[in-house]
Amino acid sequence: MFFDPKDGMRPPPFKHTVYNALVIPRPIGWISTISSEGVINLAPFSFFNSLCGEPPCVMYCPNGFKTGTGELKDSLTNVTATGEFVFNMCTQDLLEQMNATSAHVPASVDEMAEAGLAAAPCEKVKPPRVKASPIALECTHLQTIDLPATRDDNPNTMVIGQVVGIHIADEVISDGMVDMAKLRPLARLGYLDYAVINPENIFSVKRPD
Ligand SMILES: Cc1cc2nc3c(=O)[nH]c(=O)nc-3n(C[C@H](O)[C@H](O)[C@H](O)COP(=O)(O)O)c2cc1C
């Protein structure tokens, strides 16, 4: 089949918006920020990725408003105000807490504490990292790009940051490498589905040159 996205994202026979199931698996950027009032915010973004390695840069996309409020998402408001954010890796054991932090709550709520997560201080930026997350990237804001929007009540943005500090838990370093089998990172699929990178699904392939 073929369809033009201008005609909507649920052409027959699809029961739900189909686009999120088409680019998979997506890494989850679990983004911590801090408001100008000092309130910690934490939220998952699967429109997230690493953009380059030297120097390392990442991006996440706060799209739409907080449900029923017409307010921008706190992860966008905070990075605009303070210029800093932190990527926290979401692993299998943190699934429940990650999901809890996707709730739309007032900006005055500390979402890390609300999800029962301990915060750990960062070295170079003010927002804390999730202590239980094995990998965290401290980032400074480079640019926010407005992406096309189909409706006024659904703005799309891309926040780009440069990684200025890297935390890797000692427990996930084996033999001079990051041990994927120990990390068990979560990936987002379409709909409400997720996948975990399990040791039996990991294999290596040599490049031709
Ligand atoms: C796994 C997962 C991935 C998500 N990815 C995105 C995303 O890429 N962009 C987005 O705007 N919202 C995404 N959401 C919804 C946000 O996490 C949610 O709107 C959150 O409340 C935003 O929080 P904030 O207002 O604290 O920034 C995702 C939710 C989940 C559970």
Image (cartoon, rainbow, N blue to C red):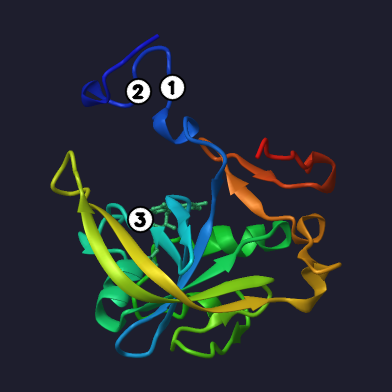
Residue 61 numbered tag = 3
- What amino acid is at disc 2? Arg
Residue 106 location, quadrant? bottom left
The yes-or-no answer for disc 2 within 8 Å of ligand 1 is no
Closer to the chain start, of discs 3 and 1, is 1
- What amino acid is at disc 1? Lys
> Taking 45 as reference, is 111 above or below it?
below
Q: Which SS class for mark 2?
A: loop
Tally the numbered discs: 3
Q: Which residue is mark 1?
A: 15
From the image, state whether disc 1 or disc 2 is nearer to you. Answer: 2
> Mark 2 and mark 1 in contact (Cβ < 8 Å)?
yes
Closer to the chain start, of discs 2 and 3, is 2
Give the quarter the ligand 1 occupies. Answer: bottom left
Residue 10 numbered tag = 2
Mark 2 → mark 3, Cα distance in angstroms: 22 Å
Position in image of residue 115 (x %, y %): 57, 72
Position in image of residue 85 (x %, y %): 42, 75
Residue 88 location, quadrant? bottom right
From the image, state whether disc 3 or disc 1 is nearer to you. Answer: 3
The yes-or-no answer for disc 3 within 8 Å of ligand 1 is yes
* Residue found 43% across the figure and 19% down from its top: 14
Q: Which SS class for mark 3?
A: loop
